[in-house]
Amino acid sequence: MLLTYRALKRRANAKKLEIRMPNGIDEASYVRIGGIDQWLSVRGEDLSNPVIVELHGGPGASNLVFAPRTRAWERHFTIVRWDMRGAGRTFAAGGPEGQGEMTLDRLYADALEVTRHIRARLGVDKVLLVANSFGTVTGLRLARDHPEFYSAYVGTDQNIIGGGRDTSSYEALLARLAKAGRRKERAKVAAMGPDRSAWSAEQWSEYAKTVVTTDPLTYDTMKTVVIRSLWFSPFHTLRGLRAYLKGMTFSEQLGPQAMTIDEYAEGTAFRLPFFLFQGDHDVLTPPEPARRFYEAVTAPVKDFALIREASHFASFRHPEQFLDLMLTRVRPVVTGEGVSRTT
């Protein structure tokens, strides 16, 4: 019965995702990027719309599963969803041994190659860079270094890794565990210490999972948005879902690499429009450090907004709020055109 219901929902989602407009695009294929085959999906109702290149989070958590939830975005933007090495269909195609070098520098180089490929394929001078969660680590670096490729940077679930300056989310987790009487888990987190650069991949993963399960809104989002999107994804068979989850575990090795970064030392000067849209109740990448970084940023245009009643995965829990921000704050800047508010 459960599998029958899943089949019906997947079929309905596939129908919802059909693009039949004469100037639309719905392409998906492997492209040789960084020496391996990597999965790229390009979807939108009108190729004259701005092109978004997404950088997904995780690490290893492809955004392709959220396509039914973000279908309305494709009316206004052409969206490129890329399964990075170690993620989704890219991981499924090559397995652990076929992913090559798993470093942040390699992901950065891959992202540049994807950007160049999409610019050539779609015949556009610049693309709009939209990064979420772990993808924002690479996103900030690309935005700093290559304003010639990107019309703007949009970060959501924005990570601000400040060289160990801010331990507020770690301390908040300890407080939640103490309040809930979860002594063993608190002791384990306390033993890890606040210096994330000293954590192993296993500790980094355990910390993230503990944050998710100790915050009611985040945990609810994981169940109702993330897990449901995975289960009902029209793009993923049961075998594909197993590969998806294995890819996330495989990609955990990237987590500790990011913890050595100091975003302030890397630079707060951006030569392109800069936007941060953060969940107002995010406990994994809290809005306060993101706002402080935003305030330090210099950019031709910059804007900051909170997505209401959202923790992590804010843009996917409330895709309509995120689209409204994209249409009212971002698109007018990158196109120079006035856009009315969405409903």
Image (cartoon, rainbow, N blue to C red):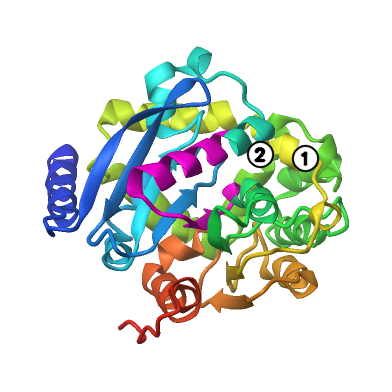
- At 60% from the left edge and 45% from the top edge, which residue is drawn? 209
Q: Position of residue 87 (x, y in %)?
A: 47, 33
Residue in the image at 56% along x and 40% along y: 112
Q: Is residue 330 left or right of residue 237?
A: right
Label 2 element class: helix
From the top left corner, tell me how far across and down residue 295 is, in percent: 76, 75
Position of residue 16 in the picture relative to residue 217 (left or right): left
Q: Where, by quadrant of the figure, is residue 324 drawn? A: bottom left
Residue 170: which disc? none
Q: Which quarter of the figure is the N terminus placed in? A: top left
Marks 1 and 2: in contact by CB < 8 Å? yes
124 in magenta:
yes
Image location of residue 132, percent across then percent down: 54, 55
- 137 or 218: nearer the eye? 137
Give how far apart the Cα atoms at labels 2 and 1 are.
Answer: 10 Å
Q: What residue is disc 1 on?
A: 188
Residue 227 visible? The answer is: no
Residue at 70% from the left image edge and 66% from the top image edge: 290
Query: In this picture, which residue range is highlighted in magenta?
Result: 110-135
Query: What residue does disc 2 label?
Result: 206
Q: With respect to residue 274, does 303 lie above or below?
A: below
The answer to whether residue 298 is visible is yes
- Point out the tag, 2 or 1, that comes first from the N-terminus: 1
Asked whether 264 or 67 is in front, the reply is 264
| Callout 1: SS | helix
Q: Nearer the viewer, mark 2 or mark 1?
A: 2
Mark 2 surroundings within 10 Å by alpha-carbon count, few (fewer than 14), some (14 through 19), many (20 or more): some
Task: Tell me where residue 200 sits by quadrant.
Answer: top right
